Image (cartoon, rainbow, N blue to C red):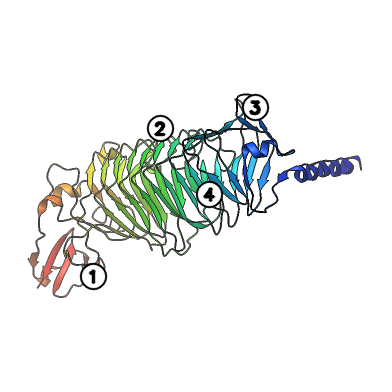
């Protein structure tokens, strides 16, 4: 009985604590930390050095606005959470800083949870503090902000995380530096539409968890753009560069664009998991090789889709110093690394991907097709001294090495110029499967052009 009363007492204390949290009245007011410091019960106090100490949770109600003023310094106490159901106007003219109040403090940061609450952030440094955004009918725009030393208490999804599906989000010209977890992320069941451009990602996931620095879920009609960023790892053995996934197998009518990024010193460069329509173009990937076991990763690019419904287009990428160049662990996604026969064709791709010194165990692996689908990979420069069929075959693993795997169609290579067609009689077609120009296997080809052992054959 005593235990029961003790439980009731603790519950009453907890409810009382919740009831004491300050909540604005939702009548359209704009609150600053200065104005909050003048309201009793907010937990915000002005310090002698001109900073504002936030020692208790508070909530900005829907319809109201929380504003950062130029040169504001906000210090949050251990465990403190600021909830915004209204709007965030964090756009000081020059600078503002949000940080912890003391060494060892781990504030929970900002939770921007309003279904209709927008967040505009510019020229703000978030230090030891994260931002969680969950506006279903709203969007977030961050420009020239710094997210550094995030303590992981606000969310396991990153220093800037999304915990509800929403579109129209933009993160540009921002810095993500040495955050405990990944830099930007969202949950597996809540895809977002987002543009991440011209940002610097430096040594994130310092606790070395199995998370890429950029970790996004795609689905629905949301487009994802990751363009013009530098994603530099700290040579951590578990943290990758860029990861986009659709692990729940959700329908995806949008597209994923990963273009013009510099990605270096991560466990791996780029990975896609699940069904999606993705364009991976003009990225430079160098030394993304810090996986300790090559069987578990270390690829410049890894494409995994057991549903075999992805469409992956790759052009103009530089891939150097990985344990693997490109890997396809399983499935039969539609992968176009280069398709040069018909420049007028809808699926024409000049290739122009370059492979340099990717390998492990003393063996070079430019392309490892462990799946069952045909991969078009023409027009590329392979890590061989002569771009010939015989030489290139040495750096590609596919059906020629294991009949259960998919074929890689890699000739002509980049230096070969226009492709040529070898003519042979139909009666000579006795040495295995042939493929039509759609990559479909043909066991008894009639007259026409086919692919056999990586080159085109004219059956007469």
Nearer mark to the viewer, of 3 and 2? 3
Q: What is the distance, in whole Å, between disc 3 and disc 1 at their CAs? A: 78 Å
In the picture as drawn, the residue positioned furthest to the bottom comes out as 446
Q: Position of residue 213 (x, y in %)?
A: 44, 41
CA distance for labels 4 and 3: 27 Å
Q: Which mark is residue 119?
A: 4
Kindly identify the residue that appears in the image at 61 percent across and 33 percent down.
106
Q: Closer to us: mark 3 or mark 1?
A: 3
Q: Earlier in the sequence, mark 4 or mark 1?
A: 4
- Is there a contact, CB below 8 Å, between mark 4 and mark 3? no
Q: Looking at the rendering, which quadrant does residue 277 occupy?
A: bottom left
Identify the residue under disc 1. Answer: 442
Q: Nearer the viewer, mark 4 or mark 2?
A: 4
What residue appears at the point 36 percent right and 46 percent down from the top-left corner? 270
Q: Nearer the viewer, residue 88 or 345?
A: 88
Disc 4 from disc 1: Cα separation: 56 Å
Q: Quadrant of the N terminus?
A: top right
Element type at mark 1: strand
Q: Specify which label sits upstream in the sequence, 3 or 1.
A: 3
**Residue 196 % position (x, y):** 40, 48
- Residue 224 visible in rendering: yes
Locate residue 74, reporting x and y percent. Answer: 59, 33
Distance in Å between CA atoms under marks 3 and 2:
37 Å
Q: For the residues carrying marks 1 and 2, which lies nearer the camera in this image?
A: 2
Q: Earlier in the sequence, mark 1 or mark 2?
A: 2
Q: Going from the N terminus, do you reach mark 4 or mark 3 first?
A: 3
Contact (CB < 8 A) between labels 4 and 2? no
Q: Secondary structure at mark 3?
A: loop
Give the number of the disc on residue 234: 2
Residue of label 3? 47
């Amino acid at each position: 009985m005593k235990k029961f009363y003790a439980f009731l007492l603790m519950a009453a204390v907890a409810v009382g604590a919740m009831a004491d949290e300050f909540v604005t009245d939702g009548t359209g007011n704009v609150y600053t930390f200065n104005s909050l410091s003048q309201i009793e019960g907010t937990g915000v106090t002005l310090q002698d050095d001109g900073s504002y100490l936030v020692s208790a949770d508070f909530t900005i109600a829907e319809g109201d606005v929380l504003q950062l003023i130029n040169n504001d310094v906000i210090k949050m106490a251990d465990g403190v959470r600021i909830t915004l159901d209204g709007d965030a106007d964090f756009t000081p003219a020059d600078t503002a800083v949000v940080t912890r109040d003391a060494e060892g403090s781990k504030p929970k940061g900002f939770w921007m949870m309003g279904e209709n609450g927008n967040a505009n952030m510019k020229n703000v440094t978030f230090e030891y503090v994260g931002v969680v955004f969950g506006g279903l009918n709203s969007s977030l725009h961050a420009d020239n902000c710094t997210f550094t030393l995030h303590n992981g208490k606000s969310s396991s999804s990153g220093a800037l995380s999304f915990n509800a599906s929403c579109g129209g989000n933009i993160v540009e010209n921002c810095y993500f530096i040495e955050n405990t977890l990944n830099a930007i992320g969202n949950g597996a069941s809540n895809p977002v539409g987002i543009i991440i451009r011209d940002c610097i990602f430096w040594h994130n996931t310092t606790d070395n968890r199995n998370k890429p620095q950029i970790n996004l879920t795609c689905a629905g009609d949301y487009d994802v753009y990751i363009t013009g960023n530098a994603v530099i790892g700290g040579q951590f053995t578990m943290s990758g560069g860029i990861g986009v996934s659709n692990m729940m197998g959700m329908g995806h009518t949008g597209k994923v664009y990963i273009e013009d990024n510099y990605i270096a010193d991560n466990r791996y460069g780029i990975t896609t998991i699940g069904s999606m329509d993705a364009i991976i173009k003009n990225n430079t990937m160098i030394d993304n090789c810090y996986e300790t076991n090559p069987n578990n990763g270390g690829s410049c690019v890894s494409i995994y889709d057991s549903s075999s419904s992805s469409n992956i287009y790759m052009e103009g990428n530089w891939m150097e110093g990985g344990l693997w160049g490109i890997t396809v662990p399983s499935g039969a996604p539609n992968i176009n690394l280069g398709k040069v026969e018909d420049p007028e064709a809808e699926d024409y791709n000049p290739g122009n991907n370059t492979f340099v010194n990717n390998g492990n165990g003393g063996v070079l692996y430019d392309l490892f097709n462990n799946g069952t689908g045909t991969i078009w990979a023409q027009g590329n420069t392979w890590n061989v001294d002569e771009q010939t069929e015989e030489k290139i075959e040495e750096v590609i693993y596919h059906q020629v090495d294991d009949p259960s795997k998919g074929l890689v169609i890699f000739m002509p290579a980049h230096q070969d110029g226009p492709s040529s067609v070898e003519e042979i009689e139909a009666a000579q077609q006795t040495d295995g499967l042939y493929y039509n120009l759609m990559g479909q296997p043909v066991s008894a080809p009639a007259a026409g052009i086919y692919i056999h052992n990586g080159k085109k054959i004219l059956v007469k």
